[in-house]
Image (spheres, rainbow, N blue to C red):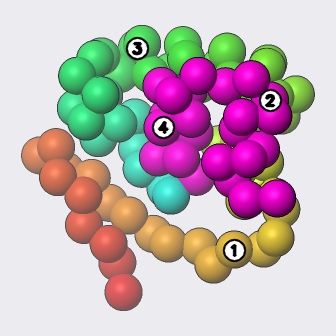
Amino acid sequence: MNAADRCNAAGLDPRESKLLAMVALGRRNECIAKEMSTTERRVASELAALERKLGVQGRVGLAQWYFGDLGAPVRTVLCFGGEEHELR
């Protein structure tokens, strides 16, 4: 089952699925807020609700749920000035 199938099976709406994907890919709340045209506080609140809904704790738990705990490679992404920069 892929991530989209898991999101649908869990009853996540498109916004929740997008938020979950961005967190799983290592994006920070600041960058997520800018991308989704909202505030960091709203992002944090929605992440907390997703954690409760999916029965996981923290960003790592959300990422593991999204990737099906397959041990996907980890990316390090920095966000400053509203832009993301991947470390290599």
Foreground disc of the pair 2, 1: 2
At a point 24% along the width and 58% down the height, the residue shown is: 84
Q: Residues within 10 Å of mark 4 (few under 14, many from 20)?
A: some
At a point 47% along the width and 46% down the height, the residue shown is: 22
Viewer-nearest residue: 36 or 82: 36
Can you identify the residue that label 1 sits on?
72
User: Height in image: 23 above or below 58?
Assistant: below
- Residue 30 in view of the camera: no
Foreground disc of the pair 4, 3: 4
Q: Quadrant of residue 46?
A: top right
Name the amino acid, label 3: Arg
Residue 13 horizontal/vertical position (percent): 59, 22
Q: CA distance from mark 4 to mark 3?
A: 17 Å
Is 13 situated left or right of 85 in this image?
Answer: right
Q: CA distance from mark 2 to mark 1?
A: 21 Å
Give the residues in magenta: 1-24
Can you identify the residue that label 3 sits on?
41
Residue 38 disc label: none
Residue 10 disc label: 2
- What secondary structure is marked by label 3? helix
Can you identify the residue that label 4 sits on?
18
